[in-house]
Image: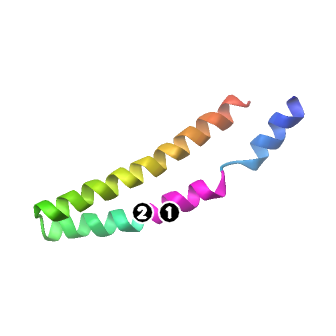
Amino acid sequence: MADKRRSDERAGLDPSVRKRVVGRIKPFVDALDEAVANPKPETIEDLQKAADKLMRAIARVMLELGRSSDLR
Protein backbone atom coordinates (compact mmCIF):
# COMPACT_ATOMS: atom_id res chain seq x y z
CA MET A 1 0.00 0.00 0.00
CA ALA A 2 2.85 2.44 0.79
CA ASP A 3 4.34 1.83 -2.66
CA LYS A 4 1.00 2.74 -4.28
CA ARG A 5 0.87 5.99 -2.34
CA ARG A 6 4.40 6.94 -3.37
CA SER A 7 3.69 6.29 -7.04
CA ASP A 8 0.50 8.41 -6.84
CA GLU A 9 2.40 11.27 -5.22
CA ARG A 10 5.04 11.19 -7.93
CA ALA A 11 2.32 11.31 -10.55
CA GLY A 12 1.28 14.78 -9.33
CA LEU A 13 -1.63 16.56 -10.92
CA ASP A 14 -3.31 15.13 -13.97
CA PRO A 15 -1.99 17.10 -16.99
CA SER A 16 -5.55 17.51 -18.26
CA VAL A 17 -6.32 19.59 -15.16
CA ARG A 18 -3.56 22.05 -16.06
CA LYS A 19 -4.72 22.16 -19.66
CA ARG A 20 -8.29 22.90 -18.54
CA VAL A 21 -7.22 25.80 -16.30
CA VAL A 22 -4.87 27.33 -18.85
CA GLY A 23 -7.57 27.03 -21.51
CA ARG A 24 -9.98 29.00 -19.32
CA ILE A 25 -7.66 31.91 -18.50
CA LYS A 26 -7.60 33.69 -21.87
CA PRO A 27 -11.39 33.64 -22.36
CA PHE A 28 -11.76 35.06 -18.85
CA VAL A 29 -9.25 37.86 -19.47
CA ASP A 30 -10.87 38.64 -22.83
CA ALA A 31 -14.32 38.78 -21.23
CA LEU A 32 -12.99 40.95 -18.40
CA ASP A 33 -11.38 43.38 -20.84
CA GLU A 34 -14.59 43.59 -22.86
CA ALA A 35 -16.77 44.11 -19.77
CA VAL A 36 -14.50 46.91 -18.54
CA ALA A 37 -14.37 48.61 -21.94
CA ASN A 38 -18.04 48.08 -22.74
CA PRO A 39 -20.10 47.39 -19.59
CA LYS A 40 -23.37 46.19 -21.12
CA PRO A 41 -25.57 43.40 -19.79
CA GLU A 42 -24.29 41.07 -22.53
CA THR A 43 -20.62 41.65 -21.73
CA ILE A 44 -21.25 41.29 -18.00
CA GLU A 45 -23.07 38.02 -18.65
CA ASP A 46 -20.17 36.81 -20.80
CA LEU A 47 -17.79 37.72 -17.98
CA GLN A 48 -19.92 35.81 -15.47
CA LYS A 49 -19.87 32.73 -17.69
CA ALA A 50 -16.11 32.95 -18.24
CA ALA A 51 -15.53 33.43 -14.50
CA ASP A 52 -17.71 30.43 -13.71
CA LYS A 53 -15.76 28.22 -16.12
CA LEU A 54 -12.43 29.40 -14.72
CA MET A 55 -13.55 28.87 -11.12
CA ARG A 56 -14.75 25.36 -11.96
CA ALA A 57 -11.38 24.56 -13.51
CA ILE A 58 -9.61 25.92 -10.43
CA ALA A 59 -11.94 23.90 -8.20
CA ARG A 60 -10.79 20.78 -10.05
CA VAL A 61 -7.19 21.69 -9.14
CA MET A 62 -8.20 22.08 -5.49
CA LEU A 63 -9.91 18.69 -5.56
CA GLU A 64 -6.84 17.09 -7.13
CA LEU A 65 -4.58 18.72 -4.54
CA GLY A 66 -6.82 17.49 -1.75
CA ARG A 67 -6.79 14.00 -3.19
CA SER A 68 -3.01 13.91 -3.45
CA SER A 69 -2.54 15.29 0.09
CA ASP A 70 -4.90 12.62 1.44
CA LEU A 71 -2.54 9.98 0.07
CA ARG A 72 0.33 11.08 2.26
Q: Is 17 included in the stretch rendered in magenta?
A: yes
Q: Is residue 41 left or right of residue 55?
A: left
Q: How is the image coloured?
A: rainbow
Q: Which residue is drawn at 36% across and 67% down?
A: 27
What's the magenta region?
14-24
> Magenta span: helix, strand or loop, mainly?
helix
Q: Is 29 included in the stretch rendered in magenta?
A: no
Label 2 Cα crowd, 10 Å radius (few <14 / some 14-19 / many 20+): some
Amino acid residing under circle 1: Val
Amino acid residing under circle 2: Ile
Q: Distance between the residues labelled 2 and 1?
A: 5 Å
Above or below for 4 versus 58: above
Above or below for 17 versus 59: below
Q: Residue 22 carries which label?
A: 1
Q: Residue at x 42, y 63 (%)?
A: 25
In percent of width and height, residue 49 lies at: 30, 56
**Picture quarter containing residue 37?**
bottom left
Q: How many discs mark residues in the rendered view?
A: 2
In percent of width and height, residue 50 lies at: 33, 58
Q: Residue at x 83, y 38 (%)?
A: 6
In percent of width and height, residue 58 lies at: 47, 48
Label 1 Cα crowd, 10 Å radius (few <14 / some 14-19 / many 20+): some
Above or below for 23 versus 67: below
Q: In this view, does 15 lie to the left or right of 55?
A: right
Q: Is residue 40 left or right of residue 26?
A: left
Q: Describe the element under mark 2 as helix, strand or loop.
A: helix
Quarter holding the C terminus is: top right
In percent of width and height, residue 20 lies at: 52, 59
* Cβ–Cβ under 8 Å for marks 2 and 1: yes
Q: Which residue corresponds to mark 2?
A: 25
Above or below for 68 versus 12: above
